[in-house]
Image (cartoon, grey):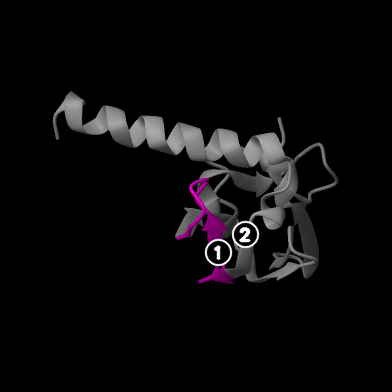
Amino acid sequence: MQLSNILPLVATAFALVHNVAARGDFSKSCTGIYLEGDHFLRATCANGQGGTTNSALDLNACMGISPTFNGNLDCIPNGNYAAFGCNTCLISHATFMVCSCPGNIRTVGDLGRCFRP
């Protein structure tokens, strides 16, 4: 893929992330929020032009087990929490993710924290 093809994609991705971050809570502009396969966050979100778009995000790219946050899930680039054995994840209260992790530990992560300015 040529650089000229990548730049519009990067600009669009930045605008979407910036738009969500400015709101501080993606659940206010998205509906049908759910997890697929324990680590893909899916939702239908406002596109900023009066319509909606189906969105997906691999949470392994941005969530991990925090060594300083009582072992709970936190915003960690390339955190790859699923590789550490976390599974049976679900969305609770729109932006909270709850997972079972090794040692019968229930971990909680506030997905809204990852998208705040």
Give neighbour class at mark 2: few <14, some 14-19, many 20+ (Cα, 10 Å). Answer: many
Picture coordinates of residue 30, whole percent (x, y): 62, 59
Residue 42 visible in the displayed image = no
Give neighbour class at mark 1: few <14, some 14-19, many 20+ (Cα, 10 Å). Answer: many
Residue 12 visible in the displayed image = yes
Q: Within the magenta stretch, is there residue 46?
A: yes
Instruction: Relative to 4, say whether 78 is above or below.
Output: below
* Marked residue nearer the N-terminal end (1 or 2): 2
Look at label 2 and name its amino acid: Cys
Picture coordinates of residue 50, whole percent (x, y): 52, 53
| Residue that numbered label 2 is attached to | 30
Instruction: Relative to 56, say whether 76 is above or below.
Output: above
Look at label 1 and name its amino acid: Ala
Of labels 1 and 2, the one closer to you = 2
Tell me what residue is drawn at x 14 percent, y 35 percent: 1
Tell me what residue is drawn at x 52 percent, y 45 percent: 48
**Farthest residue toward the bottom?**
88
Picture coordinates of residue 60, whole percent (x, y): 53, 51
Tell me what residue is drawn at x 63 percent, y 66 percent: 31
In the image, the segment drawn in magenta is 35-53
Distance CA(mark 1)–CA(mark 2): 6 Å
Instruction: Relative to 24, say whether 96 is above or below.
Output: below
